[in-house]
């Protein structure tokens, strides 16, 4: 299992001294040992060349789509295992070298959607924007250009610029598309599903964060960004559609080569539900009421009908809620446990409502566990008895035991009773 990088100073020194693909390979293998242990198989130069030079990049990713809650589809490009491990080590290196802007909240150790939402709690006005096609809108050239600048400084020599090129190939995907004017062209982009992509978005969006934070400071607002979800909040309504603040925010976003998704722009004011990254922030951070209702309902079904019937009712509800079918059937026990863990993260372990729901869940899980152990014991006993009987028959012990019993019954009772018993066993 992967663990936190400890030898950060050495990684910084080795990255600063890199001049060749062999140097990059050695650094990746150093990090791989830290992440996965001394017994981890090292990457080879051939492997690195294959993933960073091959023109068959489409074969390096598995692609599928999942429906979005508000319509449309989200395309996932997940790297094959070999490339995924390379990217995981590369991501650890990038995280050691790069310090994101303090307004960035997504994909960072020690930060979560709860931290993001807390910044905007109890505000008079909450203004949300969404960046359109956030990951796919970042091409390989843009990743390469960022690697030339501090803190990476891969633009200091021809050799290091070539390394920037290799790293940008490792972190991006490419597909062939047909352009109306240019015909078939190769489209490169940041794949949503690669371990490196979240970190790279924070690298590329650092200037965006700095400039939008400047707007927030100027107008006494609070600003944060969680991936493609941008939020401003304050106690004065400076968010008029054609007002100075909104126009300046949009100009900065477009200047940084991003686009606003107009369908997801929202101004939420006090007195109405205010939501940030899926959490309610009107007074203090909380989950939506529907979240509580769903948890209560599933626990009630389990308490009332037992796990088997409740699981069938749960599955119908779960699929309707998700809007698509995942591979395999979700386990009701695991889903409820996961939702309670999320509720604990949002509300805290000492929250009375969480404690009450969690107590019900633990009681049901304990009963199910005890019943499962009983069923397992009975099944094991039955199987053991069948095996013993089969063994006795094979060894001739079963007939001998029957004859001995019949002879004993003749002496003790009568011949008729002994024969009746004998015939009933044939």
Image (cartoon, rainbow, N blue to C red):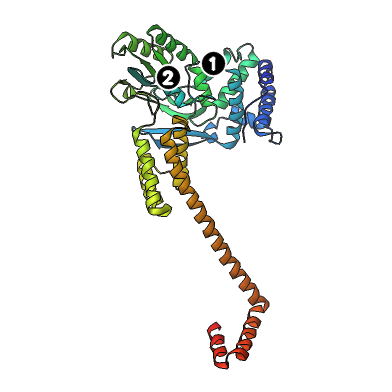
Q: Residue at position x 32%, y 8% from top?
A: 244
Task: Give 126 or 79, whichever is nearer the viewer.
Answer: 126
SS class, disc 2: loop
Q: Check disc 2 and report the residue beneath it.
A: 119
The Cα–Cα distance between marks 1 and 2, rounded to whole angstroms, is: 29 Å
Quadrant of image for the N terminus: top right
Q: Is residue 135 left or right of residue 2?
A: left
Residue at the spot of label 1: 146
- Within 10 Å of the Cα at label 1, are there few (<14), some (14-19), or many (20+) other Cα atoms? some
Residue 38, position in %: x, y?
Answer: 71, 33
Q: Is residue 129 left or right of residue 97?
A: left
Instruction: Please give left or right for residue 18 compared with residue 261 in the image.
Output: right
Q: Nearer the viewer, residue 238 or 180?
A: 238
Estimate the x, y position of residue 192 in percent, counting from the top left: 48, 30
Q: Position of residue 399 (x, y in %)?
A: 63, 82
Q: Which of the two discs, 1 and 2, sits closer to the camera?
A: 2
Camera sees residue 173? yes
In terms of depth relative to the viewer, which is nearer, 101 or 140? Answer: 101
Res 149 → quadrant: top right
Q: Quadrant of the C terminus?
A: bottom right
Task: Label 1: state its secondary structure.
Answer: helix
Seen from this angle, which residue lies furthest right? 38
Q: Position of residue 102 (x, y in %)?
A: 50, 16
For the point 64% across and 81% down, the residue is 401
The residue at the far bottom in this view is 415
151 or 185, which lies in front? 151
Q: Is residue 14 left or right of residue 383?
A: right
| Mark toward the start of the polypeptide (1 vs 2) | 2
């Amino acid at each position: 299992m992967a663990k936190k990088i400890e030898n950060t100073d050495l990684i910084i020194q080795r990255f600063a001294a890199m001049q060749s693909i062999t140097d990059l390979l050695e650094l990746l293998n150093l990090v791989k040992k830290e992440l996965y242990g001394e017994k981890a198989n090292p990457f080879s130069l051939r492997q690195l060349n294959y993933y960073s030079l091959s023109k068959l990049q489409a074969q390096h990713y598995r692609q599928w789509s999942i429906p979005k809650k508000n319509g449309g589809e989200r395309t996932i490009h997940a790297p094959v295992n070999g490339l995924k491990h390379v990217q995981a080590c590369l991501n650890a290196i990038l995280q050691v070298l790069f310090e994101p802007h303090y307004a960035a909240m997504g994909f960072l150790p020690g930060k979560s959607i709860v931290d993001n939402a807390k910044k905007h709690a109890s505000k008079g006005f909450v203004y949300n924007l969404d960046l359109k096609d956030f990951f796919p809108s970042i091409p390989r050239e843009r990743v390469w250009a960022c690697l030339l600048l501090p803190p990476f400084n891969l633009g200091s020599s021809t050799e290091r610029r070539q390394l920037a090129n290799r790293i940008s190939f490792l972190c991006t995907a490419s597909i062939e598309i047909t352009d109306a004017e240019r015909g078939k062209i190769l489209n490169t982009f940041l794949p949503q599903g690669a371990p490196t992509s979240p970190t790279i978005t924070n690298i590329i969006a650092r200037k965006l964060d700095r400039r939008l934070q400047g707007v927030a400071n100027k107008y006494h607002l609070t600003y944060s960004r969680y991936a493609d979800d941008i939020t401003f909040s304050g106690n004065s309504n400076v968010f008029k559609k054609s007002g100075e603040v909104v126009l300046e925010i949009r100009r900065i976003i477009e200047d940084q080569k991003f686009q606003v998704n107009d369908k997801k722009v929202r101004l939420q004011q006090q007195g109405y539900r205010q939501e940030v990254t899926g959490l309610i922030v009107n007074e203090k951070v909380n989950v939506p009421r529907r979240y509580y209702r769903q948890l209560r309902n599933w626990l009630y079904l389990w308490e009332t009908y037992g796990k088997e019937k409740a699981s069938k009712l749960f599955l119908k509800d779960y699929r309707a809620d998700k809007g698509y079918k995942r591979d395999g059937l979700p386990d009701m026990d695991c889903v409820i446990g996961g939702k309670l863990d999320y509720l604990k993260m949002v509300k805290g372990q000492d929250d009375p409502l969480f404690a009450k729901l969690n107590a019900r869940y633990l009681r049901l899980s304990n009963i199910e566990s005890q019943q499962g152990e009983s069923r397992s014991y009975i099944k094991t006993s039955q199987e053991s008895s069948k095996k013993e009987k089969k063994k006795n028959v094979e060894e001739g012990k079963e007939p001998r035991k029957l004859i001995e019993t019949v002879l004993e019954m003749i002496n003790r009772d009568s011949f008729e009773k002994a024969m009746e018993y004998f015939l009933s066993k044939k």
